[in-house]
């Protein structure tokens, strides 16, 4: 589900609205992320693995299928579902680009279990999380440092490093990178040396 110039405006808007639900509801994001990562899955497997109640699990899967981010893969019971790849890029104020991708949905899905990500979304919104995810990818690719990220995001280097570390596993799950080996302890040690 990638945005292209040849797509009809209505389809692009529909795609955006269906993806917006994933970014607003942590449970939807968790289900999408699990299916995207694991491949074809039944609702029963989701119930067992994600510790969901049966009624809500079927409701969530139906909602995701109706919006087009999950597709049924078999006609037999139990029905198996696959996740559709998402990549929507939005430009805000002609300046900043935000890419909505499976990696961003995975970051939102961790909101329920990761206090750092939850707090970051509360303070900076989903668009802020998208920007931090982009910076995490750049940092893990050796293109920037936590200090440069801190300047761009207007925060302390330590706060920048904390969110970069929280998003690091997501980057390695979704992008082909070699592990740089940087850790929060390295940053704290470097901060202490600067004082």
Image (cartoon, rainbow, N blue to C red):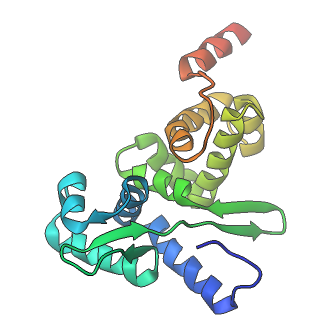
Instruction: Answer with the quarter of the image where residue 125 lies.
Output: bottom right
- On screen, residue 110 above or below 1: above
- Residue 85 relative to residue 13: left or right: left
Work out which quarter of the rendered image holds the C terminus and state it: top right
What percent of the width, then of the height, locates residue 4?
A: 72, 77
- Tell me which residue sits at (61%, 41%) in the image: 176
Task: Using the rendered image of the protein, determine whether residue 159 is visible from the camera's viewpoint.
Answer: yes
Q: Nearer the viewer, residue 45 or 106?
A: 45
What percent of the width, then of the height, locates residue 29?
A: 41, 62
Work out which quarter of the rendered image holds the N terminus and state it: bottom right
What percent of the width, then of the height, locates residue 162?
A: 55, 33
- Tell me which residue sits at (45%, 68%) in the image: 22
Q: Nearer the viewer, residue 158 or 74?
A: 74
What percent of the width, then of the height, locates residue 80?
A: 29, 70
- Residue 34 relative to residue 20: left or right: left
Instruction: Answer with the quarter of the image where residue 17 lies.
Output: bottom right
- Residue 81 relative to residue 165: left or right: left
């Amino acid at each position: 589900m990638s945005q292209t110039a040849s797509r009809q405006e209505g389809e692009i808007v529909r795609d955006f609205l269906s993806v917006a639900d994933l970014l607003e509801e942590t449970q939807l994001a968790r289900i999408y992320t699990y299916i995207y990562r694991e491949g074809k899955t039944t609702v029963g497997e989701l119930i067992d693995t994600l510790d969901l109640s049966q009624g809500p699990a079927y409701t969530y899967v139906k909602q995701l299928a109706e919006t087009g981010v999950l597709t049924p893969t078999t006609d037999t019971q139990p029905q198996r579902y696959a996740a559709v790849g998402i990549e929507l890029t939005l430009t805000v104020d002609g300046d900043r680009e935000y890419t909505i991708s499976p990696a961003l949905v995975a970051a939102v899905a961790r909101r329920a279990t990761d206090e750092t990500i939850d707090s970051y979304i509360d303070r900076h919104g989903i668009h802020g999380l998208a920007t931090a995810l982009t910076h995490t990818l750049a940092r893990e690719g050796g293109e920037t440092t936590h200090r440069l990220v801190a300047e761009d995001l207007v925060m302390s280097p330590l706060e920048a490093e904390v969110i970069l570390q929280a998003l690091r596993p997501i980057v390695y799950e979704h992008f082909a990178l070699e592990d740089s080996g940087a850790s929060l302890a390295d940053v704290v040690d470097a901060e202490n040396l600067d004082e």
